């Protein structure tokens, strides 16, 4: 994983005074695995992201902002291509799908680096 993709896992752990062993135990992983997630030697798994949300109340956008932004940019590029195809169709189902894509864009506008 790139060192340019910061995460706040270590910060959250230290903020609450948890040792790596304690947090690893809560997450159901080894201390070694947690260390690799914190040092970005391993990319966060979906279970880790869900666990962080349960434990700290921080969603993926908050705890892993760069990773979230990277995924958002990729999905929004795909949505843009999909939108072009849907606009050509004009039927009711396509209009409903375009509404979803519009909502996606609205939610991501503060991070509009994807367009």
Image: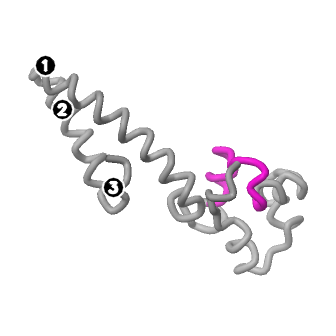
Q: Determine the CA span between mark 1 and mark 3.
A: 26 Å
Residue toward you, 77 or 28: 77
Q: Is residue 7 left or right of residue 107?
A: right
Camera-nearest label, 1 or 3: 3
Above or below 70: residue 92: above
Q: Is residue 74 left or right of residue 86?
A: right
Tell me the tag on residue 99: none
Callout 3 crowding tier (Cα within 10 Å): few <14, some 14–19, many ≥20: some
Q: How is the image coloured?
A: one colour
Q: Secondary structure at mark 1?
A: helix
Q: Is residue 115 left or right of residue 71?
A: left
Callout 1 crowding tier (Cα within 10 Å): few <14, some 14–19, many ≥20: few
Q: Earlier in the sequence, mark 1 or mark 3?
A: 1
Q: Position of residue 108 (x, y in %)?
A: 34, 54
Q: Secondary structure at mark 2?
A: helix
Q: Which residues are magenta?
A: 38-52
Label 2 sits on residue? 96
Q: Position of residue 3 (x, y in %)?
A: 69, 58
Which residue occupies 64% across, 44% down? 46
Q: Image quadrant of residue 19?
A: bottom right
Q: Earlier in the sequence, mark 2 or mark 3?
A: 2
Above or below 67: residue 63: below
Would residue 14 be counted in the magenta stretch?
no
Q: Dots 2 and 1: beta carbons under 8 Å? A: no
Which residue occupies 37% across, 54% down? 113
Q: Dots 1 and 3: beta carbons under 8 Å? A: no
Tell me the tag on residue 89: 1
Camera-nearest label, 2 or 3: 3
Which residue occupies 25% across, 53% down? 106
Residue toward you, 6 or 56: 6
Q: Position of residue 93 (x, y in %)?
A: 17, 23
Label 3 sits on residue? 112
């Amino acid at each position: 994983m790139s060192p340019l993709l910061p995460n706040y896992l270590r910060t959250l752990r230290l903020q609450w005074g948890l040792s790596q062993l304690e947090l690893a135990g809560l997450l159901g992983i080894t201390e070694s695995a947690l260390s690799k997630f914190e040092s970005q030697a391993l990319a966060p798994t979906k279970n880790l992201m869900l666990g962080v949300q349960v434990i700290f109340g921080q969603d993926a956008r908050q705890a892993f902002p760069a990773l979230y932004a990277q995924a958002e940019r990729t999905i929004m590029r795909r949505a843009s291509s999909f939108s072009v195809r849907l606009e050509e169709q004009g039927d009711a189902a396509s209009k409903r799908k375009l509404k979803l894509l519009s909502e996606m864009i609205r939610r991501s506008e503060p991070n509009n680096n994807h367009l």
